[in-house]
């Protein structure tokens, strides 16, 4: 009986942790989408496909030496309506670390 209860508590904790990770990932993606739209608008280019694509994780240290997880997203845009170019966004949590657009579409 206690083994079953312990297993149930462990499973509930794992599900709650998994849900939290999933929710943080969704929030980061939503932030990246807003940043991509704003960046394209300011640069007077067209944001293509309406969403960003997850490109990867990496660990980095901040100015105080503390480790943090950085997420990188990519997105496509066009300045002339014909050729695609790719931009990128790097987030620490949902906070912007870097954003960039290619020099010229190719």
Image (tube, grey):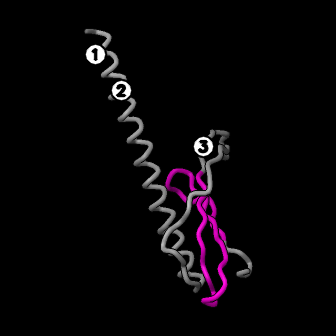
Residue at image location 56% in from the left, 81% down from the top: 42
Name the quarter where the N terminus is drawn. Answer: top left
Residue 74 in percent (x, y) is at 61, 65
Is the Cβ of the residue at disc 1 closer than 8 Å to that at disc 3? no
Q: Residue furthest left?
A: 1
| Predominant SS of the magenta segment | strand
Q: Which residues are magenta?
A: 71-100
In the displayed structure, 54 sits above or below 9; it is: below
Residues at marks 1 and 2, CA–CA distance in whole angstroms? 10 Å
Relative placement, left or right, of 34 versus 78 is left
At 32% from the left and 11% from the top, the residue drawn is: 3
Q: Secondary structure at mark 1?
A: helix
**Which quadrant holds residue 10?**
top left
Q: Which residue does the image show at 41% across and 38% down from the upper left? A: 18
The residue carrying mark 3 is 68
For residue 11, which numbered disc appears in the image? 2
Q: Residues within 10 Å of mark 1 (few under 14, many from 20)?
A: few
Percent coordinates x, y for residue 27 in the rendering: 43, 55
Which residue is labeled 1 in the image?
Answer: 5
Q: Within 10 angstroms of label 2, few (less than 14), some, or many (20 or more) residues?
A: few
Q: CA distance from mark 3 to mark 2?
A: 27 Å
Whether the magenta-drawn stretch holds residue 98 is answered as yes
Figure quadrant of residue 45: bottom right
Label 1, label 3: how far apart the Cα atoms are = 35 Å
Determine the image quadrant of residue 81. bottom right
Q: Give above or below for 12 relative to 26.
A: above
Which quadrant does the C terminus fall into? bottom right
Query: In the shown orientation, is residue 8 left or right of residue 99?
Result: left
The mark closer to the camera, 3 or 2, is 2
Label 3 secondary element? strand
Q: Earlier in the sequence, mark 1 or mark 2?
A: 1
Q: Nearer the viewer, residue 10 or 68?
A: 10
């Amino acid at each position: 009986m206690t083994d079953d209860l312990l297993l149930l508590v462990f499973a509930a904790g794992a599900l709650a942790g998994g849900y939290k990770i999933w929710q943080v990932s969704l929030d980061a993606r939503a932030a990246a989408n807003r940043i991509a739209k704003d960046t394209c608008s300011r640069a007077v280019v067209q944001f293509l496909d309406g969403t960003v694509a997850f490109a990867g994780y990496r660990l980095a240290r901040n100015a105080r030496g503390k480790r943090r997880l950085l997420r990188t997203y990519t997105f496509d845009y066009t300045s002339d309506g014909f050729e695609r170019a790719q931009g990128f966004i790097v987030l620490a949590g949902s906070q912007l670390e870097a954003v960039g657009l290619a020099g010229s579409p190719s």
